[in-house]
Structure formats: structure tokens, C-alpha cells
Image (tube, helix red, strand yellow):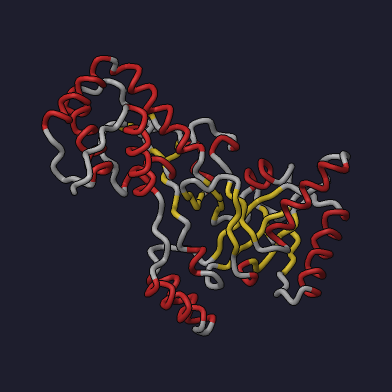
Amino acid sequence: MKNPILKPSQQNLYNIWLEEKLRHINPQELSASDKRVADKFLNEPKAERIRILKEQCNGLPHHFYKYLAHPFITTNEEEIKEKKRRLESILLHNQLFLSSHTDFNDPFDVYPHYKKDCGIKDIRQYVINSMKILDNNPKPSESQISIHTHQISQNVAQFTENLISNLRQACANTGIFCATTDAENILMWSHYTNYHQGICIEFDNTEDIEMATLFQQVEYQTNNMRPVINPYISSTPDDYDVYNLHKASAWKYENEWRIALANTKHTSMSFNPAYISKVILGVKAAQETVDYIHSINEQRKENTLPTFEIKQAYMADHEFKILH
């Protein structure tokens, strides 16, 4: 007996659409064949891995860097303990924490402009796409399409606002980890390490190619116009870039790359312990911070983890430049 055709409500039309949208804007996991390639890559000599990364990985840099404040920016013991826990999750437990864009200092980040003046044609196509997903039916009946199109068009403004609200929430649930290619940026040392008192972690992409290939380069809008998205149209792989990788040109100095994965906010991802190759201490790092980083390296040694190099940043003599 053929299953009866389901009749979606407006609310589950939202959910169906969002499920399909998230399916497109989330980078694909490595296939079994890709995993074999990654394993083969890690077995190559270091010099060969560097060459492959440079010549065959679409501009993927050798290193990423993450600027972080030190744990001692407060005198509150509980806050220090929490900050140490966050830092040690990376340096001792090999975990990258995925934030939400709502945690960021840029209110425009992962916050595109949604087109609201959508016509009947857009609504109709939205209904068709949604019903195809729900019924797994490439040809929904014209009567059902007309009924749902008419229902939505009767209160299109509210429906559009609800749809956009759902999309905003989906964006807020995306887990994001941000990094840069520049370890000697004066502004980033100032903004993200508590005025050069914190640290900068170096990640070596030849040591964890699976993690490295999840990073995508941020695009800075030279015309300073926000991306515009029609909430009714079917999503495409390009939506991943529009949602997660477009920022105002004012942020260009950050040279940012990021991981962005749907439905993973405030979760962590494990990486190869050898992925951390260096920790750079800020120009103004206090002895307490220096001792703390060295103690973490000793703990790594005790835990039979590869240790990282520790370098001290310093000011160039004749230029406005940070070196290490």
C-alpha cells in the first residue's frame, strides 16, 4: 500500500528547508579514500609534506596561528581556573573549541542581509523544494503547491520574518574556530592577547592535514557591501562562503582562516598532538605566564606528548615590527 502524502505545516516547512540548507553549508567530511590519502601524506618525510602542501593544497599555508590572552588577567581564582581550563584544552588535551558568531567582537560576522521583498515565484519555488524534500517526490501535486503557496502569501511578511529568524538561529548554532597566517601582527597582539601579555600558538598543517583542510580563507568585501541572501531560494555550496566567510574590509589585516561547522557551537574537535609546533610569548608577557607555558610543556613531556617550541616575541630595533 502506498504511503499517504504528508501535508507539511508552515512550521515543518521551515524545518525541512533549514535541514537542507545546513546540509549544503557544512563542509563534507573526508571520504574513506580521502582518509587514505591523508594517512599517506602523514607518512611522507617532512620536506615532502611541506612541498605537497605548497603545490597541491589550494593555497593552504604551512602554519596557522591563534592569539590568546593569558589566564592571569584577573585576580579572581575561579576565573583564572576557567581560563586555564580553556587554554589547557588546546595545549594539553589537543582540542579546538568551536565558538558561535554571537561570541565574536564583530556584530556583522556571519550576519548576512536577507532579502524580504520576495514574490509569489520565490514562494512557489520554496514550497516545491520543501515538499520534494518531505515527500521524496520530484513532482509534488499542483494542488498542494497552490494551497501552500496561497497560505504563505496571505501573511508573507510574518512568514518571511519567521524564516529569517530560523536561519539566524541556525547560523548562531554554527561552530567556528578562527586563526590567522600572521604571528607578528601588532594589532592582533594588542587586541587578542591583552596588550601583548598573552601568547600566540602555532599550528603546523603538515602534522594534521585532516584538520588543516577544514579551514577556509575569509573573504574581505572590497566594496564593503554585506552579502544578500534570498531566504526562499534553494541553497547551493556557495552559501557556505556567503554565510561564514565574508567580512568587512576593515578586518583585512587579520588574514583570517576559519573552520565553520553546522550545529557544533560550543563543542570541541580533537587534533593530532603534533599539530602544535610552537608557542610564542608576548613582548610584555609576565614571568608568571612564561613559567606557566613552560610547565604545560613539562606536562606534555610527562604525558608522552610531543613538546612544542617556546619563543619570546620582541620589538624590532628600527621598525614598527614584532619579531620572534
Residue 51 pos. (x, y %): 45, 76
Left or right: 222 as drawn, with respect to 254 = left
Identity of the residue drawn at 59% across and 35% down: 105
The residue drawn where x is 74% and y is 57% is 88
Percent of width and height locating residue 274? 63, 72
Please state which of residues 190 and 15 is positioned toward the viewer in this rendering: 15
Height in image: 112 above or below 196?
Answer: above
Judging depth in this view, the residue of 6 and 229 nearest the camera is: 6
Q: Quadrant of residue 118?
A: top left
Whether 249 is drawn above or below 276: the answer is above
Which of the 4 image quadrants contains residue 165? top left
Where, quadrant-wise, is the C terminus in this rendering? bottom right
Q: Using the image, determine if residue 114 lies above or below residue 318.
A: above
- Residue at 35 percent across and 42 percent down: it is 21
Q: Position of residue 304 (x, y in %)?
A: 75, 77
Residue 196 or 100: which is nearer the viewer? 100
Residue found farthest to the front = 1
Q: How many marks?
A: 0
Taking the image as shown, residue 122 lies to the left or right of residue 49, namely left
Q: Position of residue 166 (x, y in %)?
A: 42, 31
Relative to residue 119, is residue 105 drawn left or right? right
Q: Is residue 241 left or right of residue 120?
A: right
Q: Is residue 293 visible?
A: yes
Residue at the far left in the pictured view: 142
Q: Is residue 257 visible?
A: no
